[in-house]
Amino acid sequence: MYKAVIAALIVAALAIGIYAAGDWSWDLPLLEQWVQSHPILGAGVYVGLFIASTILPVTGLPLLPLAARAYGVAVTCLLSTLGWWIGCVIAFEIGRRGRPYLQRIASPKTLSRCEQLITQRHTFATVVVLRLLFPGDFVGFALGLLRYVGFWTFAFASLLGTIPGAVIASYAGGELGHGRYGTAVAAVAATVVVLYVIRRLWEARTGAGQAR
């Protein structure tokens, strides 16, 4: 799963490069005008779409440049964090409440892997790291299956783990929205490197790499 995340980030960087090379425009005047005319409603719709993108197989990333242009990077970061975090918590609750059904369809290997990735002793810190490394839906659904992961522990830890990704994504979206493709690619590339380092440090500390 981690390799899939890294691959997705690399593909995103390549897509940005291709987009910039094509000299296309991010200008969506009608949509921007609507957002500027209905800022509160637009913010609500944005957060709702990001919640949906966390629990459904869709993505809200293409909205980042538009949001950054309409609201600024700081507000976009706040809205993105809120949407991704709420979606992650909802995924956790779905996993928790649907545990009897999910246990029947999830492979024993998957459940065993989840148990190995997180221990009761370091629950909070591990949830933060897992949320840094993996998408919110995967973390929420997977950890919802573990009985000893408490709701509030997961909620606060996943919030901390969501913020860094939201900051990077919002910054890169802002750069894209203003046509600064080079810095957007650099931000994505830096994210790949940082995630790789965090993964290695986490594996060295917990021995998770040997659990595969």
Image (spheres, grey):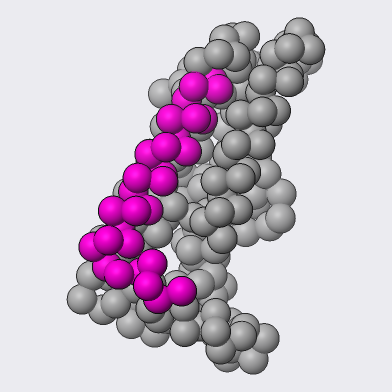
User: Residue 121, can we see it?
Assistant: yes
Q: In the picture, which quadrant includes the N terminus?
A: bottom right
**x and y percent of residue 165 in the render?**
44, 40
Residue drawn at the location 23% of the way across and 62% of the way down: 205
Asked whether 196 or 117 is in front, the reply is 196
Asked whether 109 or 167 is in front, the reply is 109
Height in image: 44 above or below 58?
above
Residue drawn at the location 47% of the way across and 25% of the way down: 187
Q: Is residue 111 left or right of residue 49?
A: left
Q: Is residue 196 shown in magenta?
A: yes
Residue farthest toward the front in the current orientation of the protein: 210
Residue farthest toward the left in the current orientation of the protein: 121
Q: Which residues are magenta?
A: 184-212
Q: Is residue 72 left or right of residue 45?
A: left
Q: Is residue 203 shown in magenta?
A: yes
Residue drawn at the location 51% of the way across and 83% of the way down: 111
User: Residue 96, can we see it?
Assistant: no
**x and y percent of residue 86 in the render?**
49, 54
**x and y percent of residue 200 in the render?**
34, 53
Residue drawn at the location 70% of the way across and 28% of the way down: 15
Q: Is residue 177 left or right of residue 134?
A: right
